[in-house]
Image (tube, rainbow, N blue to C red):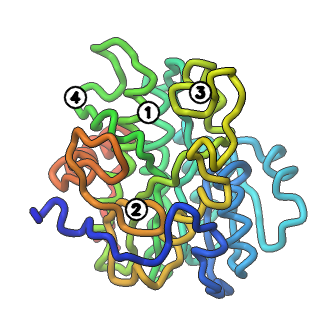
Amino acid sequence: MDSIGNKQTPLHTGFDASTTAAEALAGRNLSGLQAIVTGGASGLGLETVRVLAGAGARVLVAARDPHQAQAALHGMAGVQIAALDLLDPHSIDVFAAAFLASGLALHILVNGAGIMAAPLLRDARGYEAQFATNHLGHFQLTARLWPALRQARGARVVCVSSLGHRQAAADLDDPHFLRQPYDKWRAYAQSKSANALFVVELDRRAAAHGVRAFSLHPGAILTPLVRHLDQDDLRRVGALDDAGQVNPPPQSGFKTVAQGAATTIWCATSAQLDGIGGVYCEDGDIAALVPDDSAGPGVRRWAIDPLLARRLWTLSEQMTCLRFDPGAA
């Protein structure tokens, strides 16, 4: 196997697509650990928070709408909420500064918030919203939280990517569709490829400081992430049958929310990944590298290419106007 794919070797963990988040935790006690979860007030993020907190971790949920998050997380012990808008660089800085001021180490950062196949929207900088939210916002957040991650002396950063990455590599020449017609699915795909590439370079730079990074495909799950999809889109992804009715799991091939959060929990907590990082995972295991034209699961070369990952890192620093150097004190 070549150098690009030599990390992408399945471990044969014993988990599969039917594994739930609670099962992936494998009974681990997370007492004393601090986690931050973006997108933790709904869908897969909510299940991720529930399982982490249930195992004893303290969890800070970063939410664009704290009032909605408060209602969703009501009564969940060990969980706090703070405002964060990934499309607003100032909001990211305020959130991170408040956490750093607490003096707490950060053991688990789950970059799970995102938007999918949205109509063209640009932020105040003119950046396309899916790339800006799904990748750049999390790049800036991770950079700002770096002192707390390093302080943990053994932290994990988990970025929720998608099998959708197979549709397009990250376009590092025109990521914001300034010179080409906007395509909502290509925009989503490149943002998910960017999630995986970010993890490759982050792990390379951060491993020496005890911080490991992972990306993952959670599986196909019906969550609020599909809010921008119309009937044709839902049929395209297999969520609706010919009569326009929702295909429930497992008939649809979709996972339940509990199953969809399993790989996130596994990446964030499993001892099976000790000493490993910079890999793309699925179904509670490291995914295999597959041909670029493959229609099935696995990771495509463009999502784990270390040269592309370094180019994306440099571009992300330029776009966010910050220097993210994990080697610095």
Look at mark 1 in the image and give the residue it sits on. Answer: 188
The residue that mark 2 highlights is 281
Q: CA distance from mark 1 to mark 4?
A: 16 Å
Residue 126 vs 328, above or below: the answer is: above
In the rendered image, the vertical position of residue 118 relative to residue 299, given as above or below: above
Circle 3 residues within 10 Å: few <14, some 14–19, many ≥20:
some
C-alpha gap between disc 2 and disc 4: 27 Å
Q: Residue at x 30, y 34 (%)?
A: 168
Q: Earlier in the sequence, mark 3 or mark 1?
A: 1
**Which amino acid is tagged 2?**
Cys
Closer to the chain start, of discs 2 and 4, is: 4
Question: What label does residue 29 carry, if any?
Answer: none
Q: Inspect the image, locate mark 1, and give the three-letter code of the amino acid beneath it.
A: Tyr
Kindly indicate the quadrant of the structure image that contains residue 257: bottom right
Q: Position of residue 52 (x, y in %)?
A: 67, 72
Around disc 1, counting alpha carbons within 10 Å, would you say few (fewer than 14), some (14 to 19), or many (20 or more)? many
Which mark is nearer the camera, 3 or 4? 3
Whichever of labels 1 and 4 marks the residue nearer the N terminus, that label is 4
Residue at coordinates 52% horizontally, 41% vertically from top-left? Answer: 89
Q: Give the residue displayed 18% in from the left and 68% down from the top.
A: 6
Where residue 86 appears, as percent x and y from the top left, is 56, 42
44 to 214, vertically: above or below: above
Residue 173's label in the rendered image is 4
Of badges 3 and 1, the one in the foreground is 3
Amino acid at the residue labelled 4: Asp
Circle 3 sits on which residue? Answer: 234
Tell me the mark number nearer the camera, choosing from 1 and 2.
2
- Whether pointer 3 and pointer 2 mark residues with C-beta atoms closer than 8 Å, the reply is no
Q: Nearer the viewer, mark 1 or mark 4?
A: 1
